[in-house]
Image (spheres, grey):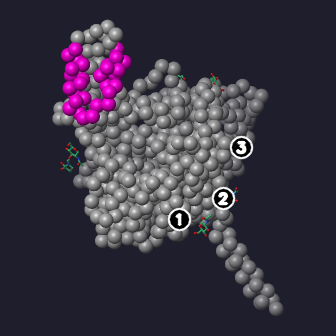
Amino acid sequence: MRSIGLTTLFACLVLLIRWAAAGQTHEYNFTTGWVRRNPDGMHEKMMIGFNGEWPIPDIHVNKGDRLIVRLTNGFDDQPTSLHFHGFFHRNVDENSNQMDGPQMVTQCPIMPGDTYVYNFTVDNQVGTYWMHSHSGAQYTDGMRTALIVHDEDEPFEYDEEMIIQLSDHYHKPYYEVMDEFLTRYNPTGAEPVPQNILFNNTVNASISFDPDTVYLLRFINVGNFVSQYVYLEDHEFTIVEVDGVYVTPNTTSLLYLATGQRTTVLVHSKPESNKNYALMQIMDETMLDVVTPGLILNRTNQVLYNGEAPFADEYFIDSFDGVTNDFYLTPLEKTALLPDYDYQITLDVKMDNLGDGVNYAFFNNISYVAPKVPTLVTAITAPKHLVKNPSIYGENVNPFILEYGEVVEVVVNNYDDGRHPFHMHGHNFQVVQKSPSFLEDPSGNGEDGEPIPYNSSSPLMEFPDFPMRRDTVVLEPNGHIVLRFVANNPGIWMFHCHVDWHLEQGLAALFIEAPLQLQANEALTENFKQVCSTGDVPVAGNAAGHVDDWLNLAGLPRQPDPLPEGFTWKGYVAFVMSCFVGIWGLQTIVHYGLSESIQDDESMYNKLKELLEEPAESN
Ligand SMILES: *[C@@H]1O[C@H](CO)[C@@H](O)[C@H](O)[C@H]1NC(C)=O
Ligand SMILES: *[C@@H]1O[C@H](CO)[C@@H](O)[C@H](O)[C@H]1NC(C)=O
Ligand SMILES: *[C@@H]1O[C@H](CO)[C@@H](O)[C@H](O)[C@H]1NC(C)=O
Ligand SMILES: *[C@@H]1O[C@H](CO)[C@@H](O)[C@H](O)[C@H]1NC(C)=O
Ligand SMILES: *[C@@H]1O[C@H](CO)[C@@H](O)[C@H](O)[C@H]1NC(C)=O
Ligand SMILES: *[C@@H]1O[C@H](CO)[C@@H](O)[C@H](O)[C@H]1NC(C)=O
Ligand SMILES: *[C@@H]1O[C@H](CO)[C@@H](O)[C@H](O)[C@H]1NC(C)=O
Ligand SMILES: *[C@@H]1O[C@H](CO)[C@@H](O)[C@H](O)[C@H]1NC(C)=O
Ligand SMILES: [Cu+2]
């Protein structure tokens, strides 16, 4: 009798555990649309919300849960998509690569009126993530929110949790800002300077602290472009997680978050509550081409201990030198340095103009241009004997074929003097080298530095025993990073700069990971194909849409041709400026010289030459 009772109890327990482990399902139906808001109190504009709501509410799930998001495109005239930043979409589910989000990579653009269903388990990932549109620069205007995966086995304790989204903010709609950015009238590729920075989608925000309480603050930089420094007057932060990876607690007073990055910290509040403190956020000014007059570089937010006490004044620090360097953080779950790689990919980053005068961004001289067929479709529908042939994906997506299970090393050398936070879909990577900036000559003579690419015979830093893992890491000006991961997640995964303007300039590559295994695991769903058909996107074929001859890439979308030999836009603009400023004004040059659509480089060059030789007339 007694033993039967115990057996039954045991069986119940097993069932209960299984049920708990199977996880809950969270369902959301979201329709995109424009909502009038004034996030910074300075300018009303249309933001992109879901179901008429903005900011979009945070999403909370538990480890192992299933998430179903039905995304309906409620725009009149533009496609959309949704990416779950930091999720691996490992093949515990079927067809999981189709849930990753980037349009023309793992899915077709969702056209107005259509619905695409994202349906996946979060598997065993935990911590701080976010989701955002992966179509154009759409998320700049607010199509983004936090996505938290709670973990009942968290390796730290706290009393209360807060989620804080940091972002930059533009007053014009993203498509106008982008048009002004990607044009031959901006030949130096100066990134659009934001008008403001937001704290959880507003300004002058307050959060309340009780005395002697431990807070878990999850900071997420959901911005388009500018990194931010964060600090709290007279308090310390203990970093416990970055990008969904628990780390050995590291105490610091200053954080730096590039776009795409998450840093989760514990803060132990003061024992007394007699005054309030400034929680400061400051733009990384070095990323800005110009500091426009009146630009707000910093914002003061309040940590309120006492509603009766006055607000804290702004609080500045002397230097940012003490900022935590994530290279020296150690993951709590120690995974040893991956042994020497099987496959090394070297990506040289450069920004330059092409023949249309527009400034583009390149990996190895290739600027990403979306193919005619989503790359996942190409991988799934290709004949087996060609699926590992990079040419079928089209050279303009920077395709790299990874073999299942191999250790991949990605070396990124920065031949540009800007900071670039690189993000990889589908994985965390080990950060095995992360150079400092070489904007200045390392000899300390105050001269401009030269780019210093990675030299595997003399790495700059000792290889860590247990390298930091994360999904977004900053590449310093003129410097380099070296990353490693195991190619055990079949799929098409983007590797790109998370400065969205730079992604729009083409700073992306695709890792075609274990395509044979991908073919075995993944089939295009009916929903996938229906969404493609609305947008007239083929659901079979190589990058140029051919199914008869897979090696025929005629019609492949490519980057514009280069400028004619010896013609540099920067030089030309300097020349034109020096000749004309004050005589005609730049507007006139633009009007007379460039307003017609100029077909080829030669005629543009001649046109400008003619213009320069013409005597200046007034008006
Ligand atoms: C979401 O949409 C589906 C399909 O139209 C519907 O069956 C479901 O009830 C909706 N769920 C909610 C929470 O509105
Ligand atoms: C935020 O604070 C600044 C400085 O005190 C003030 O000028 C501004 O009006 C405030 N804005 C809003 C929206 O509260
Ligand atoms: C989500 O995926 C699961 C597992 O494949 C499936 O059972 C379920 O029907 C799917 N739900 C929707 C709404 O597609
Ligand atoms: C930030 O905003 C989200 C909603 O967008 C809200 O859920 C969250 O609680 C806010 N965080 C704080 C610290 O107030
Ligand atoms: C903070 O911003 C104000 C203007 O918004 C500016 O005058 C001040 O120099 C900035 N301070 C720092 C340290 O960035
Ligand atoms: C904390 O981070 C700093 C680098 O910012 C590093 O030097 C130090 O070793 C780290 N400490 C721990 C315990 O991770
Ligand atoms: C890129 O182009 C430059 C100049 O044409 C050339 O020197 C360099 O080798 C090219 N890089 C790659 C990786 O193809
Ligand atoms: C790389 O480092 C090795 C060893 O220090 C050195 O001999 C070699 O010249 C370096 N290569 C380059 C291209 O600097
Ligand atoms: Cu970049």
Percent of width and height locating residue 581: 32, 14
Task: Note whether 70 is above or below 436 in the view shown.
Answer: below
Would residue 616 be found to the left or right of residue 34 on screen? left
Circles 2 and 3: CB atoms closer than 8 Å: no
Q: Is residue 480 left or right of residue 91?
A: left
Amino acid carrying label 3: it is: Asp
Q: Which residues are magenta?
A: 585-614
Does residue 233 appear in this view? no
| Residue sitting at x 34%, y 10% | 619
Q: Is residue 254 above or below residue 465?
A: above
Residue 378: mark: none
Q: Amino acid at mark 2?
A: Glu
Q: Which mark is residue 526?
A: 1
Residue picked out by circle 3: 212
Q: Is residue 186 visible?
A: yes
Mark 2 lies on residue: 27
